[in-house]
Image (tube, helix red, strand yellow):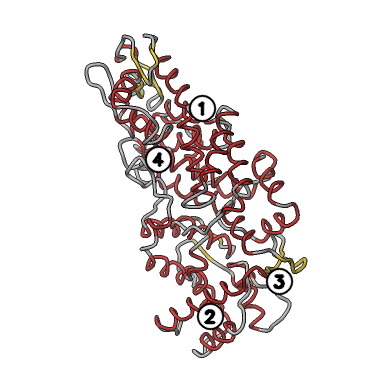
Amino acid sequence: MPISRREFLKLSALVTTSAALSGCGAIYRRLTGSMSVTEWSPMDEHDFTVLNRLTFGARPDERARFLEVGLKPWIEEQLDIQSIDDLDCSLRLAPFRSLEMEANELEAISNQLFENYDRESLPAELRLASLIRQVYSRRQLYEVMVGFWNDHLNIFTEKGNCFYLKTVDDRRVVRTHALGSFRELILASAHSPAMLVYLDNHVNHKGAPNENYARELMELHTLGVNGGYSQADVMELARCLTGWTVKDHFWLGDFEFNADLHDPGVKYVLGMEISDSGINEAEQVIDTLSTHPSTARFISSKLAWRFIADDPPEELIQKGARAFLDTEGDIKSVLRVILLDGVDFVQPKYKRPSDFVISALRMLHAQTDGRGPDESLRGMGQSLFGCPTPDGYPDNSAAWQGNLMPRWNFAFRLVRGEIEGTQIDMEHLLAYVPDDDLTVRFDALATLLLGVPIAEPFRSGLMELITSGGTNEEEMLQILAAGILVSPSFQWK
């Protein structure tokens, strides 16, 4: 691309200013999934922001459906995941055979006993499958929630046997309970060998207590750091969790409660007397933690941070917490309150690397096997399942605003077809535009990515800058697309 870095910075600034000045008169081509035109339809800037918050980047068919039915029905359709035909995504996942395997099978193939797998290929398949789902699944709100819970219940795949155990955890814990009961989610996580290994509870036994999982269960998974528990509560919960371990022989990698490793005797957690009852001790505490008022507030706060703003209104957090307590932790009920009552309080959030990469792929209708984007996310500091600390990747704008150069490189390589296993057909993407006027094509591309057309006088400035290099139309469209992707307008959602 014959364009200098200085010119590119000017291009990015022009894109940002033009988008900002277009205001609430935003319009975009209302398209079907096959990108055939139906009509021009208005969509204001706020609705565009809201829809992008509920997806990994709103594609034209999702925008059209949103306009047709409105926010509440659109959310209800997304929450009813079984009614959403996701065959295309399922077919793309077919090559990833490890996704449906049990722990003992995964451990066996990781040792190359009968398959061409190794320690690196198993977590790689999980990462690639997650990327494919985020890009192609029509169950977008569900996939956003899967990502939310994978952050909340973070497991680092490079620790111990988590490289294969996380595959089972992703299927049985997060994906099974992402829109279900919070209690069942936490109970499933507590029985997850991946979680027990990651937080060292598989070596927590009488005579050698390990408090790691007990602490994070309270601090990160339920009550929150200010949830009202003490160090004594952590120690007593760790005693309750002794003997919760992972099988190391038959059915290798499955959960096991080993009574011989359990610390007997009465325990006291959060003011409750816990009788000497083996595995039931920790399950009793988990029941209490899962329905505790501090947990209700903590989960409501985190959902509001993810979907509404880095500093969500206190009133909204309280409403979400009440819904949590009233429904005994029904995740869909809490989500409805956060999304519907919080819609007027949505504020821009800076895209995390995964949001940036996936939204670019989705909005440009890329065809990808996930390999190149996976490598790009590593370079941006957010490889999926790659956060070593139990609090997961941060969910605030300030944490991610310093890694611009990898984003620029990704944008230019993406539009030029230089990302491994990933292609964009710009001509097919804009085939629906009935006019050969280059400015019309520019407008179509801008509305596809930003929800707004390029406004004058900035359109003329962009045209002059991009056409002055003497490039052909394909290259000019590539330059514009890359400039939009790296502009602040696209970096925020």
- Are discs 1 and 4 less than 8 Å apart at CB? no
Dot 3 corresponds to which residue?
A: 432
Which mark, residue 183?
Answer: 1
Q: Where 313 falls versus 444 (above or below)?
A: above
- Mark 1 or mark 3, which has the lower sequence index? 1
What amino acid type is highlighted by mark number 3? Tyr
- Distance from disc 3 to disc 2, alpha carbons, whole Å, reads 19 Å
Residue mark closest to the camera, 2 vs 1:
1
Query: How crowded is the residue under tag 3: few (<14 C-alpha within 10 Å), some, or many (20+)?
Result: some
- Distance from disc 1 to disc 3, alpha carbons, whole Å, reads 48 Å
Q: Residue at x 37, y 35 (%)?
A: 226
Where residue 41 sits: x, y (%)?
A: 74, 66
Residue mark closest to the camera, 1 vs 3:
1
Q: Quadrant of residue 379?
A: bottom left
Q: Nearer the viewer, residue 369 or 388?
A: 388
Query: How crowded is the residue under tag 4: few (<14 C-alpha within 10 Å), some, or many (20+)?
Result: many
Where residue 167 sits: x, y (%)?
A: 44, 38
Q: Residue at x 32, y 43 (%)?
A: 389
